[in-house]
Image: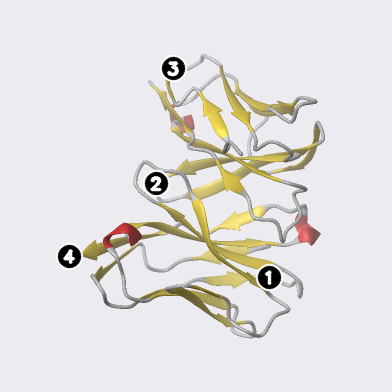
Amino acid sequence: AQTVTQSQPEMSVQEAETVTLSCTYDTSESDYYLFWYKQPPSRQMILVIRQEAYKQQNATENRFSVNFQKAAKSFSLKISDSQLGDAAMYFCAYRTDNTGNQFYFGTGTSLTVIP
Amino acid sequence: KAGVTQTPRYLIKTRGQQVTLSCSPISGHRSVSWYQQTPGQGLQFLFEYFSETQRNKGNFPGRFSGRQFSNSRSEMNVSTLELGDSALYLCASSPLGRARNEQFFGPGTRLTVL
């Protein structure tokens, strides 16, 4: 069974500093996709970054990058130069075409940015 | 394009009642998924509809049901409400529902069961 684990319920970071959010997953599939979604307080969930499992290169989107370790089944999110607007709940998610396209989400990490 | 919309945004019901939530996907998107979000549990997958057919279903009791119309709009229904059904219900749409596709989320419907 696919599971996604986020072991850090809460994290905080000083503005302009770097923070890393952890995510591990369990799967027997070889072809899948990993996502980080951001849910600001009382606002809609939006996609931050996506990683295809077949790609060795880590995905990067501006200040957001991932450290994808396929063998270790680890998918961490690094936020550089943290901004106040980065404060949100972050969810790690896994998806594969082989399980009916269902998303499996972690329980989330609440990120606080300290001015 | 307009984003995913959900109505109503807030609902208060009492135990035993039933409720219907509505979701309008982004124009052209044929896949609609529903999730239940509760503190500590994260997002739990309810079901996915594609071209009016339920393609996948999560591990929820039969009190939770849904449907999709020909215009891709979707509804979910919860019958015989229980206190534990209080949650944020999120709808998400994607063009084809393939794993590589980004899912676009709506703002959610906050259901409170008293």
Q: Which residue is mark 1?
A: A27
Q: Nearer the viewer, mark 4 or mark 1?
A: 4
Relative vertical location of residue B7 with respect to residue B30 in this rendering, above or below: above
Q: Amino acid at mark 2?
A: Pro
Mark 1, residues whose alpha carbon is within 10 Å: few (<14), some, or many (≥20)?
A: some
Q: Amino acid at mark 3?
A: Lys
Instruction: Give the structural element (helix, strand or loop) at label 4.
Output: loop
Expressed as whole percent of the image width and height from the top left, the position of residue A81 reads 32, 75
Relative vertical location of residue A88 with respect to residue A82 in this rendering, above or below: above
Picture quarter containing residue B65? top right
Q: Earlier in the sequence, mark 2 or mark 3?
A: 3
Q: Please report contact status of discs 1 and 3: CB closer than 8 Å, yes or no.
A: no
Figure quadrant of the N terminus of chain A? bottom right
- The Cα atoms of the two marked residues, 1 and 3, are separated by 39 Å
| Whether marks 4 and 1 lie on the same chain | yes
Q: Which residue is mark 4?
A: A115
> On the picture, is B7 further left or further right than A115?
right
Picture quarter containing residue B113? top left
> On the picture, is B32 further left or further right than A87?
right
| Whether marks 1 and 2 lie on the same chain | no
Q: Earlier in the sequence, mark 4 or mark 1?
A: 1
Tell me the residue at 49%/76% (across/down): A65
Q: Nearer the viewer, mark 4 or mark 3?
A: 4
Q: Nearer the viewer, mark 4 or mark 2?
A: 4
Q: Which residue is mark 2?
A: B39
Tell me the residue at 61%/56% (across/down): A104
Q: Amino acid at mark 4?
A: Pro
- The Cα atoms of the two marked residues, 1 and 2, are separated by 25 Å
Expressed as whole percent of the image width and height from the top left, the position of residue A9 reads 36, 62
| Whether marks 4 and 2 lie on the same chain | no
Relative vertical location of residue B27 with respect to residue B22 in this rendering, above or below: below
- Callout 4: residue from which chain? A
